[in-house]
């Protein structure tokens, strides 16, 4: 068993350290960066932004934990923030060479696999109706802005078109997405497969996965 703490910053992102071996770990990929356990990786899964109702729809037996600790104010530039969000100087000092195709503090959904690294700007998703069908590793994927949380997410689908109607997303294969749950024509929940994803700032995704694709943008020749 290992216990993890926040050990500092690299590329303006937090770095984890396990207290047993002092190995440093990437908190997005689970990769050991430096130390005794380099070459190993931690099992990772998607951390999704959902409310309690959505969580219960996904799994009626889910345990809901309510903390009695006070909520701390966000550090400027760390949370979603507004259009003028900035990184604090102590973060900027740790940055490497940035990818300037998008603004540093741009928000979006980063999706990755062994073959693909792709970034979906929230701004582009809004412009395209808040729900788009794209292709990841030869499979169709629905990328959307959740109606309740306003955060982006992605799920594999067999559809080719998607449209919002209220808080539900209707697909052209007689299926829909309701409160984060994929539902069939009979109204019953269906198994849901998702790519690895993270809601993040552009600088963090591009420095973690250099030279990613950007949805809706064509790279200059």
Image (cartoon, helix red, strand yellow):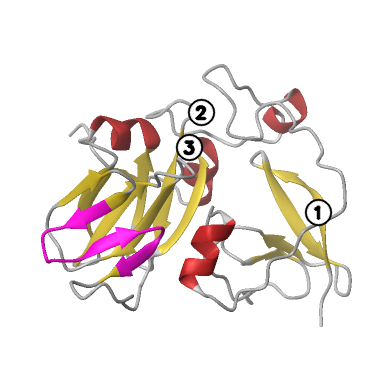
Pointer 1 residue: 6
Name the residue at 81% across, 41% down: 71
* Crowd tier of the residue under label 3, counting other residues whose Cα lies within 10 Å: few below 14, some 14–19, many 20 or above: many
Determine whether, in the image, residue 163 is placed left or right of residue 40.
left
Nearest the viewer among 200 and 67 is 67
Badge 3 element: helix
| Residue 104 numbered mark, or none | 2
| Residue 133 lies within the magenta run | no
Mark 3 and mark 2: Cα distance apart in space: 6 Å
Eyeballing the image, is 6 above or below 11? Answer: below
Q: Quadrant of the N terminus?
A: bottom right
**Magenta residues (range):** 169-182
Q: Residue furthest front?
A: 187
Q: Quadrant of residue 64?
A: bottom right
Q: Quadrant of residue 166?
A: top left
Nearest the viewer among 44 and 63 is 63
Mark 3 and mark 1: Cα distance apart in space: 22 Å
Residue 89 percent coordinates (x, y): 74, 23
Residue 36 percent coordinates (x, y): 78, 74
Residue 94 percent coordinates (x, y): 70, 36
Residue 172 percent coordinates (x, y): 11, 59
Q: Earlier in the sequence, mark 3 or mark 2?
A: 2
Is mark 3 in CB contact (under 8 Å) with mark 2?
yes
Pointer 3 residue: 202
Badge 2 element: loop
């Amino acid at each position: 068993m290992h216990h993890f703490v926040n050990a500092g910053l690299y590329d303006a992102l937090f770095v984890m350290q396990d207290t047993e071996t002092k190995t440093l770990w990437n908190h997005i990929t689970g990769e050991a960066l430096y130390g005794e356990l380099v070459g190993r990786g931690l099992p990772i899964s998607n951390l999704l932004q959902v409310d309690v109702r959505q969580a219960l729809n996904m799994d009626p037996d889910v345990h809901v934990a309510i903390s009695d600790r006070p909520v701390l104010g966000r550090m400027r530039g760390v949370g979603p923030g507004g259009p003028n969000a900035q990184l604090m100087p102590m973060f900027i000092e740790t940055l490497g060479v940035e990818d300037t195709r998008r603004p540093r503090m741009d928000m979006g959904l980063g999706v990755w696999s062994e073959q693909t690294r792709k970034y979906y700007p929230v701004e582009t998703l809004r412009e395209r109706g808040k729900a788009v069908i794209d292709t990841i590793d030869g499979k169709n994927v629905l990328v959307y802005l959740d109606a309740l949380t306003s955060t982006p997410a992605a799920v594999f689908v067999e559809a080719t078109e998607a449209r919002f109607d209220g808080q539900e997303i209707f697909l052209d294969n007689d299926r829909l997405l309701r409160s984060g749950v994929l539902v069939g024509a009979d109204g019953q929940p269906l198994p849901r497969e998702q790519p690895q994803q993270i809601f993040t700032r552009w600088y963090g995704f591009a420095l973690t996965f250099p030279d990613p694709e950007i949805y809706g943008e064509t790279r200059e020749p």
